Structures are given as C-alpha cells and as structure tokens.
C-alpha cells in the first residue's frame, strides 16, 4: 500500500500553504505583499502580510535550492526570474585566481586557566578603584 497525502508538505495549519506557488508567481510579476494578501482574502484565506512574506520566502528558497542543487550551479549564477531587473555581474577575472594567503598562527601552549589569569591580572574590575585611577589620571 502506498500512502498519498492530500495536503502539500509542511504543517497542515498553514492556511496560505496551498497558494504558495501562486503567491511566488504574483510576487515575481511585481505585486506587493499587500496586494497578494488582499487576493488571498478574496478567496477566503485571511492572513497577515508577514504570513504572505514568509510563504513567498519559503517557496522561493525551496525553488532556488532545488534548482541550484540539481544543476550544480551556484545560486548567484542562476538565471533571473521574469520581470525582474537584470543585475550585471562583475566581469570574470582575466588571470588565474590566486590562492588566499594563509597567515601562520602559532598555537598558544598555555592552559586556559593560565590565559584567563593573564587576562584578569591586567584588568581592574573594582569600579571604585577604576574611578579613583581615572580621577588621578586626566589623560
């Protein structure tokens, strides 16, 4: 026996979930979240603007991650959606990319307790003593 759910994936209490793809299409056509919310209200789904934004973001994220994962293309290399302004990318580098320089970091051989003691010894934690030192030293 094969189970076939009737609802789309996700929490069943999400009212606008069934219209997520339609909301995304409306958004790519240039409609505002308020206009999409009013369209949903016209069909009997009363939600807030935040819900519309969240559903559009979910379906857009799912679509872009599925598109990028399937094609092996980075998300910034994906073709833009219709009715969206084209963003010109920087021209490709003409030289071979250089490897980033890695700074050599010497490991600290002191224990955590020794590091903490060295830090605390150079700090004045008493606010009265700190105020007295600040009053004497005008610089």
Image: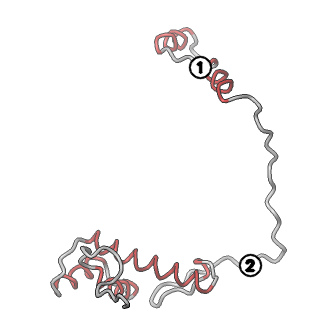
Residue at image x 26%, y 71%?
Answer: 49
Q: Nearer the viewer, residue 31 or 9?
A: 9
Horizontal placement of 44 versus 123: left or right? left
| Mark 1 Cα shell of 10 Å, populated few (<14), some (14-19), many (≥20) | few
Horizontal placement of 78 versus 85: left or right? right
> What mark, if any, has residue 123 been given in the picture?
1
Is the residue under label 2 in contact with that under label 1 (CB below 8 Å)? no
> What mark, if any, has residue 92 been given in the picture?
2
* Spot occupied by residue 14 in the image (x, y as percentages of width and height): 26, 74
| Mark 2 Cα shell of 10 Å, populated few (<14), some (14-19), many (≥20) | few
Q: How was the colour assigned to the protein in this rendering?
A: secondary structure
* Spot occupied by residue 72 in the image (x, y as percentages of width and height): 64, 82
34 w.r.t. 5: above or below: above
Give the tally of numbered discs. 2
The mark nearer the N terminus, 1 or 2, is 2
The quarter of the image holding the C terminus is top right
Q: Nearer the viewer, residue 1 or 93?
A: 1
Residue at image x 46%, y 11%?
Answer: 128
Horizontal placement of 75 versus 21: left or right? right
* Spot occupied by residue 45 in the image (x, y as percentages of width and height): 19, 81
135 w.r.t. 16: above or below: above
* Spot occupied by residue 137 in the image (x, y as percentages of width and height): 58, 12
67 w.r.t. 14: above or below: below
The quarter of the image holding the N terminus is bottom left
Horizontal placement of 44 versus 65: left or right? left
Could you say whether the residue bearing mark 2 is in a helix, strand or loop?
loop
The picture quadrant where one finds residue 121 is top right
Residue at image x 70%, y 28%?
Answer: 111
Could you say whether the residue bearing mark 1 is in a helix, strand or loop?
loop
> What mark, if any, has residue 102 been given in the picture?
none
Q: Mark 1 vs mark 2: give the one in front.
A: 1
């Amino acid at each position: 026996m094969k189970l076939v759910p009737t609802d789309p994936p996700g929490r069943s209490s999400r009212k606008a979930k069934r219209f997520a793809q339609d909301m995304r299409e409306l958004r790519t056509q240039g409609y505002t979240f308020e206009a999409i919310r009013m369209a949903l209200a016209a069909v009997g789904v009363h939600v807030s603007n935040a819900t519309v934004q969240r559903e559009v973001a979910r379906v857009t994220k799912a679509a872009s991650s599925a598109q990028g994962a399937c094609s092996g293309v980075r998300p910034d290399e994906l073709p833009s959606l219709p009715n969206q302004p084209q963003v010109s990318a920087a021209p490709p580098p003409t030289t071979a990319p250089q490897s980033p320089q890695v700074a050599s970091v010497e490991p600290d051989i002191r224990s955590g307790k020794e590091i903490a003691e060295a830090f605390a010894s150079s700090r004045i934690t008493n606010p009265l003593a700190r105020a007295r030192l600040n009053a004497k030293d005008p610089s």
